[in-house]
Image: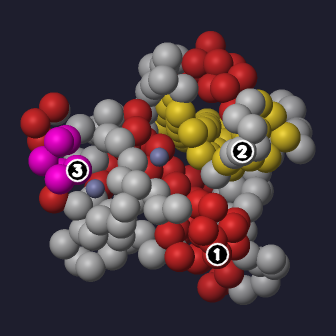
Amino acid sequence: MNIVRISSFITHSSLKEIGNKILDSFSGIIEEFEVSHHDSFVLDHIDACLLTMILEEEYGGHALGITDADLQTKDEFYKSIFGGKNSKNSIAVVSTKQLSPTRIESDEDYNLFISRTTKVSLHEVGHNLGLTDHPKYKQAKDGTLCLMSRGEFNKFGIDGYIKAVIDGRGFNFCEECKKFLKMVY
Ligand SMILES: [Zn+2]
Ligand SMILES: [Zn+2]
């Protein structure tokens, strides 16, 4: 699969770290990844669906786009999203815009930012492979939330949601998701 950075300050080595986590979590399904940089345009915001179409045209196949632009949707309620995928192709996109701590001043801040970005990326790649959201919380074997847990967004607001749901996720899937992946691939 392709991992494409679109105007984001995330480093090349962090993108590789995310790629390696994807290989770990989907071992036997995703065999390799390539990192590309698509930095020809700098954006403040972009329509999520449009971005998947641009990436589909340029990279095709299975790709994950990571951008710090705000990803917007036509949905009345969820005007901007952390991540999404286009059901018509195999392109998933993640916005780091809201995942960053208020300031990135230490390694700790940066690591938190990367771990959040990784978790949202794994969730969207999971959708690409056919997994669906858990509206309720489901746990993986190690006690962390399954990567496909979605939880209730309206209950928390953005900051609360990031802390409760995204930070609560680990890097693993629950047994049900694992079974699904085994069955299909
Ligand atoms: Zn989802
Ligand atoms: Zn699960």
- Counting residues from the N terminus, which is met first, the one under dot 3 or under dot 2? 2
> Is the residue indicated by label 3 positioned so its CB lies within 8 Å of ligand 2?
yes
Q: Residue at x 16, y 32 (%)?
A: 185
Residue type beneath disc 2: Phe
Question: What is the span of residues highlighted in magenta in the rendered image?
Answer: 176-181
Badge 2 marks a residue whose secondary structure is loop
Ligand 2 quadrant in view = bottom left
- Counting residues from the N terminus, which is met first, the one under dot 3 or under dot 1? 1
Q: Is residue 32 left or right of residue 58?
A: left
Q: Which residue is mark 2?
A: 77
- Counting residues from the N terminus, which is met first, the one under dot 2 or under dot 1? 2
Residue 159 x, y percent position in the rendering: 69, 72
Q: Is residue 14 visible?
A: no
Residue 18 x, y percent position in the rendering: 48, 56
Residue type beneath disc 1: Gly
Q: CA distance from mark 3 to mark 2?
A: 28 Å
